[in-house]
């Protein structure tokens, strides 16, 4: 029996040693966290599968910042962590996994917490496969809009930037405008139980890593705002698609409709952002403005939506000035598009939008 035990132990040791020697290097290439030495961050960075938004106090010199990153074990980043860069525009980084093969590209943006409040949808980032809308002060990008375009790219349907649900057209109310169209997701989307994709644009970020597994969680709503929003105003046109569907099946007699809304909520360490699962239900929600008379119209139609404070809620002035409240604005071509219900071809055009507010200094 003792001899058998010795042989067993030897075999186990040989097997264990072989497993250890043959263990493949880590193939993950993720940024897990980041910090910004020498700058005041007003809230935790938002890290998605391919982007990082870092929020800094107003007046921060963003021309010379050196973010430091924590990566998955064994991974490296180019430029190296701690490199000084000019963040007047978003900066690209490439993370290489420990195996030296897998790579992931990130775009890192440093954003002043003074959120842009006038939106004409004239500016987009160049050189992208789909439209990325931005707001600028001069040449400086001060805000980048989010959409689900990165998720739609995974369907293989779009061939050009104009084939996406979210894009830009020339004939706006004045100049260019935002165009949102509910599209088919093709064969791939259908077998995934996601037969349509509503056109959408929102303030926040989109986590493409959750696009297929949990699309509602993928929409991270909101950026810091240090004022009290009172109205969301602007112009829209809307035309519903011909056939409303639920889960890809036609629904007789039902018409699609768009949605336009804005929310303000309090952030915390446990609730840094709201998403598609809790934007209307979270106890952190403070106030909301939402269209309740949306209609089909071929004319540019004005809307002015008041922010209504929720029962029992109030705004703490100190937290407000510290950037502890987020605001999100959301546009979508299909009201139920987050549940993949709507009509292919439903089209919402948006232009000349303003977030009206009062200061609490």
Image: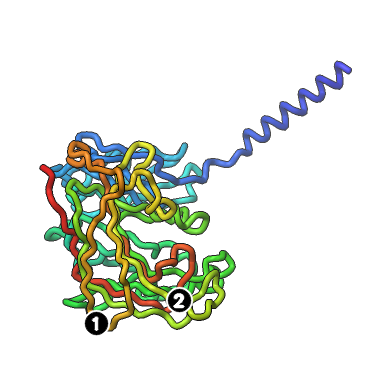
Farthest residue, direction right: 1
Q: From this viewpoint, is residue 196 visible?
A: yes
Q: Which residue is nearer to you in this view: 316 or 14? A: 316
Assign the C terminus to one quadrant of the image: top left
- Image position of 99 with respect to 232: above or below: above
Residue at the spot of label 1 = 299
Q: Position of residue 156 (x, y in %)?
A: 48, 70
The answer for how far apart the CA atoms under marks 1 and 2 are is 21 Å
Measuring 44% from the left and 74% from the top, which residue is drawn there? 183
- Image position of 118 with respect to 293: above or below: above
Q: Position of residue 139 (x, y in %)?
A: 14, 60
Q: Position of residue 208 (x, y in %)?
A: 43, 56
Q: Which mark, by number, is residue 231?
A: none
Measuring 31% from the left and 42% from the top, which residue is drawn there? 267
* In the displayed structure image, the side of residue 111 where residue 76 appears, left or right: right
- Image position of 243 with respect to 358: above or below: below
Residue at the spot of label 2 = 343
Q: From this viewpoint, is residue 78 visible?
A: no
Give residue 320's quadrant in the image: top left
């Amino acid at each position: 029996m003792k001899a058998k035990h010795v042989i067993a132990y030897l075999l186990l040791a040989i097997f264990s040693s072989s497993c250890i020697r043959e263990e493949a290097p880590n193939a993950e290439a993720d940024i897990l966290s980041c910090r910004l030495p020498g700058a005041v961050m007003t809230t935790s960075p938002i890290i998605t599968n391919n982007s990082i938004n870092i929020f800094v106090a107003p007046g921060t010199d963003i021309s010379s910042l050196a973010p430091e990153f924590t990566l998955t074990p064994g991974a490296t980043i180019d430029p190296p962590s701690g490199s000084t860069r000019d963040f007047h525009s978003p900066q690209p980084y490439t993370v290489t996994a420990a195996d030296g093969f897998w790579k992931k590209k990130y775009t890192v943006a440093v954003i002043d917490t003074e959120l842009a409040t006038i939106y004409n949808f004239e500016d987009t980032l160049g050189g992208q496969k789909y439209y990325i809308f931005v707001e600028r002060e001069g040449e400086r990008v001060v805000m980048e809009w989010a959409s689900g375009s990165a998720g739609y790219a995974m369907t293989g349907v779009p061939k050009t930037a104009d084939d996406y649900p979210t894009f830009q057209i020339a004939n706006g109310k004045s100049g260019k405008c935002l165009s949102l169209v509910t599209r088919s997701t093709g064969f791939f989307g259908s077998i995934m139980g996601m037969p349509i994709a509503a056109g959408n644009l929102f303030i926040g970020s989109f986590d493409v890593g959750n696009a297929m597994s949990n699309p509602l969680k993928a929409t991270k709503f909101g950026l810091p705002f240090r004022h009290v929003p009172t109205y969301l105003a602007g112009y829209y046109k809307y035309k519903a698609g011909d056939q409303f569907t639920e889960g890809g099946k036609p629904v007789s007699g039902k018409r699609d409709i768009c949605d336009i809304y804005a929310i303000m909520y309090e952030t915390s360490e446990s609730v840094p952002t709201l998403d598609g699962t809790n934007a209307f239900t979270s106890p952190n929600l403070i106030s909301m403005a939402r269209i309740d008379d949306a209609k089909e119209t071929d004319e540019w139609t004005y809307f002015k939506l008041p922010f209504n404070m929720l029962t029992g809620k109030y705004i703490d002035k100190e937290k407000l000035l510290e950037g502890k409240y987020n605001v999100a604005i959301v546009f979508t071509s299909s009201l139920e598009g987050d549940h993949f219900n709507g009509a292919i071809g439903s089209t919402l055009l948006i232009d000349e939008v303003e977030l009206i507010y009062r200061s609490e200094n």
